[in-house]
Amino acid sequence: MSKSAAGFLILAAMSGVMHFSLFEETVVTLPLIACGVFSVLFVLALIAGRKIKFDPVLR
């Protein structure tokens, strides 16, 4: 896991916990939207961080 993916995972978890601890009755809040955005960025960072093995020497 790359550093950016780990950072987005931590940010998504923190904003999700903040939503559930501060707002119990509200359905959509800013921390919940941020949690969704950080989760999408986490998945994109996981995809982008994969090592693609490419052999530049043609045989």
Image: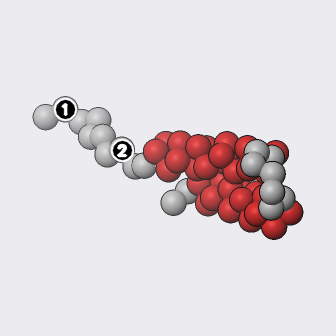
The residue most toward the front is 25
Query: What's the CA distance linking mark 1 and mark 2?
Result: 17 Å
Q: Which residue is mark 1?
A: 58
Number of residues whose C-alpha sits closer than 10 Å to that of mark 1, classed few (under 14), some (14–19) or many (20 or more): few
The residue most toward the left is 59
Relative to 25, 50 lies left or right: left
Q: Residue 29 at what x, y percent from top left?
A: 80, 46
Q: Which residue is mark 2?
A: 52
Relative to 14, 41 lies left or right: left
Relative to 1, 28 lies left or right: right
Q: Residue 48 at what x, y percent from top left?
A: 49, 42
The three-letter amino acid code for the residue at tag 2 is Ile
Q: At numbered mark 2, what does the secondary structure look like: helix, strand or loop?
A: loop
Q: At numbered mark 1, what does the secondary structure look like: helix, strand or loop?
A: loop
Residue, x 61% and y 44% (percent of image)?
A: 41
Q: Residue 46 at what x, y percent from top left?
A: 50, 50
Residue, x 70% and y 51% (percent of image)?
A: 35
- Between 20 and 4, the residue placed more toward the observer is 20
The three-letter amino acid code for the residue at tag 1 is Leu
